[in-house]
Amino acid sequence: MELYELLVNMGHWLEGSIHYPPHTQRPVNEALAAELGYTTSAISLMLNLPYVDSHVNRDDETSIVERTRFADYTLEELKEGRRPYPYQHRDGCPDLDPWVMPLALPGRDGWNIMLDTRLGVVRAYGIEWSPPEDTVEWRRHGEVAGDEWDRMIWTEHRRAPLVPAAQYFPEIIDAYRSLARLPLIEAHLSDPMHKRVYPSDYPGWIVTQERELLDGLLALYRECGWPDEWRRAEFVTKWAAKRKEIDDRAREGREMASK
């Protein structure tokens, strides 16, 4: 809840985008959740989570994890959460362990972010890479023979690194609050200190646009008093103008490059 409210306060989401429990207008289907195999603790959590407007949550421009959306268990994600992407497309693949509840659902090359309600830990890993093989969590399950690899992938979430939930979310919140991570731009650009290495043939106008977005956004947060003397309305107005200015220059650069 604190993370969602922070993202609204920082101007990433519109005010009024968060729906708080109890969810009376669009309730969680508890009977279906039990039928699908969720544990009592997982269902209880669904009932008490806040959710974000679907038109915001499904927009890549307002996601904070690339190609990934927050799960909303008042919608069809109730079924998807038992077997999220990519497991839903693998024949014979079982549902997740019933005490494992996805907090975010990936699209292609997105991220699985799951809460283990039994252990109180978060398991997070990118679809493109799968859980790393050099961790304690991986090794405790033993080596995988070549002919068993495909079957192992069905339950690879059990091998994902564990982070206590009480640590995972405060670290994300602190990263945004300290501006070590920035909202309002594409998720893969959210670290203002990361110096991207571009291929030699990468369009120069894109390189310039991305750098201007990062530098401009970081400077504007500070100019508008983040976090102690924060002037949200002023920031939102100025960022809209700044973003248009940067995008207009990028469009001109693209047009010149195409001539």
Image (spheres, rainbow, N blue to C red):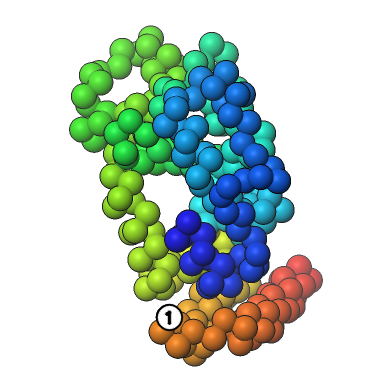
Between residues 188 and 25, which one lies in front from this camera angle? 25
Between residues 82 and 190, which one lies in front from this camera angle? 82
Assign the C terminus to one quadrant of the image: bottom right
Which quadrant would residue 61 be assigned to in this image? bottom right
Q: How many marks?
A: 1
Placement of 254 over or under 151, stated as above or below = below
Placement of 107 over or under 252, stated as above or below = above
| Amino acid residing under circle 1 | Pro
> Does the rendering let one see residue 163?
yes
Question: Left or right of 39: which side holds 16?
Answer: right
> Does the rendering let one see residue 204?
no
The structure residue drawn at horizontal position 30% and vertical position 16%, both measured from the top left corner, is 144
Which quadrant would residue 83 be assigned to in this image? top right
Q: Name the residue under label 1.
A: 227
Q: Where is residue 17 in the image (x, y as percent from the top left)?
A: 64, 60
> What secondary structure is marked by label 1?
loop
The structure residue drawn at horizontal position 63% and vertical position 31%, both measured from the top left corner, is 29
Q: Where is residue 28 in the image (x, y as percent from the top left)?
A: 61, 36
Crowdedness near tag 1: few (<14), some (14–19) or many (≥20) residues, C-alpha within 10 Å: some
Q: Where is residue 42 in the image (x, y as percent from the top left)?
A: 45, 32
Placement of 182 over or under 99, stated as above or below = below
The structure residue drawn at horizontal position 31% and vertical position 39%, both measured from the top left corner, is 120
Between residues 126 and 200, which one lies in front from this camera angle? 126
Q: Where is residue 69 in the image (x, y as percent from the top left)?
A: 58, 47
Between residues 122 and 27, which one lies in front from this camera angle? 27
The structure residue drawn at horizontal position 65% and vertical position 39%, both measured from the top left corner, is 27
Question: Left or right of 165: which side holds 62?
Answer: right
